[in-house]
Amino acid sequence: MIWITRDRPKIDRIACPWLIKRFIDPDAEIIFAPHQQVLQKAAEIKAIPFDMPGVEYSHYEDRCTFDYIIKKHNLKDEALDRIAAIVRGADTDRHDFAPQSAGLEAIFSGLNYNIKNDRELLELGMTIYDGLYSWAKHLYKLKHTQGGPIEDLLFQVYNQYLKVDKSKKAPAWAKILREMIQDQLDTNMTMSLQQASQELEINPAYLSREFSKYFDNLSFGEYMRKLRIDKAIQLMENEQYSLTEIAYLTGFSDQSHFNRTFKRQVGQNPLNYRKSVTQVKKVQKR
């Protein structure tokens, strides 16, 4: 199959060819063309256009083209789901989707600036996404400080003797942000890092970098997901709410996203968790 998209690729338009060639069609041919020529060339050579307005393979809802390809071709792989969140955050400037999104955007913005040949850029991008997939498949739980005994020892010394309790000296913006997040607990909790930075009048890159220092050593996205799952667990104690309603009330776009996030945080899916809680209550009443 031949696939065609706009020239000067950066994030999604490199991630998608990688996904296509690695998981759908290893022999796929990827063509880059000027924006105004893509659809005409696609018709001439019977190619599939992607990451273009008005075509099937494109952004939908708050998702990007990479997400659509996974959905369209029914690719079931947790590592791809992790990469999808990173690509989505980088491609839509929503770095709250995944803490790695800002880094991915920075890398490919720099490569796009340095490399003017789209084929060379794609070739290098394929290698980068191969590495990202290996991380998402095998290494995503491993922190940099877990690399060996020396790193472990230094990290232990840091935590026990050197780490300063920065919560005692939290800046004014951190206190205001905590109040803003608390207010979100009574809504569907859809606040983004970008929205928070605008409200606080703080640079989003600075906020992303400093956030974890004052919020349980978690990134903005991780912290918000934790709060949403904590709220979901509270709502599960009330049997009048269905799991679909709980997913909506905690700000998840759909049931499957809620299920995946809940399982990553808690270790089991929402249905099994609710069953176990119900059984415990029954035993306690006896």
Image (cartoon, rainbow, N blue to C red):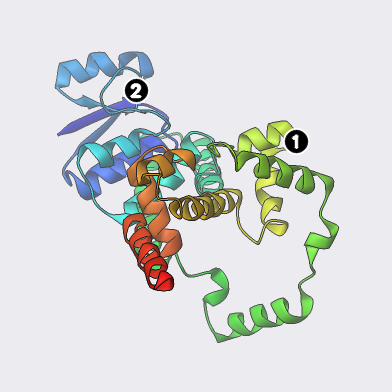
Quadrant hosting residue 32: top left
Position of the N terminus by quadrant: top left
Q: Nearer the viewer, residue 275 or 74?
A: 275
Place residue 177 in its image quadrant: top right
Asked if marks 2 and 1 touch (Cβ < 8 Å), the reply is: no
- The image shows residue 95 at horizontal and vertical percentages of 55, 42
Callout in the foreground (2, 1): 1
Q: What residue type is labelled 2?
A: Met
Q: Three-letter amino acid code at disc 1? A: Leu
Provide residue 277's location: percent of width, then percent of height.
40, 64
Near-viewer residue (184 or 283): 283
Left or right of 114 in this view: 61? left
Q: Marks 2/1: CA distance?
A: 34 Å
Residue 181 image offset from top left, x and y in percent: 66, 43
The residue identified by callout 2 is: 52
Query: Would residue 3 appear left or right of 137 to someone viewing this image?
Result: left
Which mark, residue 200?
1
| Residue occupying the point 75% across, 37% down | 202
Q: Residues within 10 Å of mark 2 (few under 14, many from 20)?
A: some
Q: Is residue 181 left or right of residue 265?
A: right
10 Å crowding of disc 1: few (<14), some (14-19), many (20+): some
Local secondary structure at mark 2: loop
